[in-house]
Image (spheres, rainbow, N blue to C red):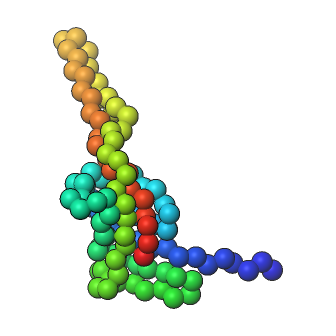
């Protein structure tokens, strides 16, 4: 039998969503402001943290856990279009939206 490799990961909450992160991961998250001092900031809403067999689960968050991340860029997603058409009046309406997101790099736990 093969031995299952256990690694380090965590679950964080940001922008109303939850993300499974590992060290050196690049993520696209909801827009956050660029940090004023450098490009490094912390995520303090950590729901779960695992390092091999050592698993910690928060109720709802872990008090002492922080995830360090590096702010890389702020970009816009592909355009999403929405078209409405009313057949009998030949009325149409087209809307488009590009969501802004932030790219981050998870540095350390």
Give whichever of 59, 90 is nearer the camera: 59
Give whichever of 16, 6 is nearer the camera: 6
Residue sitting farthest toward the front: 38
Q: Is residue 56 left or right of residue 75?
A: right
Q: Is residue 8 left or right of residue 109?
A: right
Q: Residue at x 25, y 22 (%)?
A: 94
Q: Quadrant of residue 65?
A: bottom left
Q: Is residue 35 visible?
A: yes
- Please state the horizontal and vertical placement of residue 83, each as a whole percent of the image: 29, 24
Q: Quadrant of residue 38?
A: bottom left
Q: Is residue 17 left or right of residue 2?
A: left
Q: Residue at x 25, y 54 (%)?
A: 34
Q: Residue at x 32, y 63 (%)?
A: 40
Give whichever of 1, 37 is nearer the camera: 37
- Please state the horizontal and vertical placement of residue 86, each as a whole percent of the image: 23, 18
- Please state the horizontal and vertical placement of residue 79, each as a whole percent of the image: 34, 31
| 87 versus 72 height, above or below | above
Q: How many marks?
A: 0
| 80 versus 2 height, above or below | above
Q: Is residue 59 visible?
A: no
On-image quarter of the N terminus: bottom right
On-image quarter of the C terminus: bottom left
- Please state the horizontal and vertical placement of residue 45, each as a whole percent of the image: 29, 73
Q: Residue at x 49, y 73 (%)?
A: 9
Residue sitting farthest toward the right: 1
């Amino acid at each position: 039998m093969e031995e299952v490799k256990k690694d380090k990961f965590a679950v964080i909450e940001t922008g109303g969503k939850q993300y499974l992160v590992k060290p050196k991961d690049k993520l696209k998250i909801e827009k956050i402001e660029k940090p004023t001092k450098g490009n490094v900031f912390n995520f303090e809403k950590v729901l779960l943290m695992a390092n091999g067999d050592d698993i910690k689960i928060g109720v709802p968050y872990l008090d002492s856990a922080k995830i360090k991340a590096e702010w890389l860029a702020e970009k816009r997603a592909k355009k999403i279009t929405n078209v409405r058409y009313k057949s009998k009046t030949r009325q149409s309406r087209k809307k488009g939206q590009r969501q802004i997101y932030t790219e981050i790099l998870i540095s350390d736990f």
